Image (spheres, helix red, strand yellow):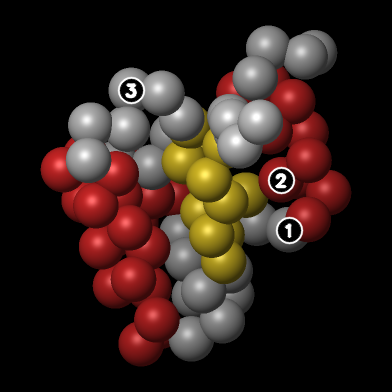
Amino acid sequence: GGDFDIVGMSALLSTTMAKQAETIRTLQTAGLIQKVKVMIGGAPVTQGYADEIGADAYAANAVEAVKKAAILVGRT
């Protein structure tokens, strides 16, 4: 129990986007980044920002997020 494959984060405001980067750094520091995939999204978030902070995927909306999550865990 307790295992998970994806960490998903959404930022509603540009002021909260930094927490997405902080979470990725925390996963790196804890040695967990190799064990999970990170997907981000939210109104102010872009693919460029996802690339910049090292996220594995970016989704512009919930439907896209479900599709990308399936790809990330190999269920497509």
Q: Look at the image and tell me in which quarter the C terminus lies.
A: top right
Identify residue type, mark 3: Gln
Please tell me which of labels 1 and 3 falls first in the chain. 3
Q: Which mark is residue 65?
A: 2
**Height in image: 26 above or below 3?**
below
46 vs 19, left or right, is right
Q: Residue at x 53, y 45 (%)?
A: 7
| Disc 2/disc 1 C-alpha distance (Å) | 6 Å
Residue under pointer 1: 61
- For image coordinates 66% across by 31% down, the residue present is 1
Please report contact status of discs 2 and 1: CB closer than 8 Å, yes or no. Answer: yes
**Residue 52 shows in the view:** no
In this rendering, is residue 70 above or below 12? above
Mark 2 and mark 3: Cα distance apart in space: 20 Å
Question: Relative to residue 56, is residue 10 depicted above or below?
Answer: below
Q: Amino acid at mark 2?
A: Ala
Position of residue 35 measured from the top left corner of the image (x, y, whole percent) = 41, 23
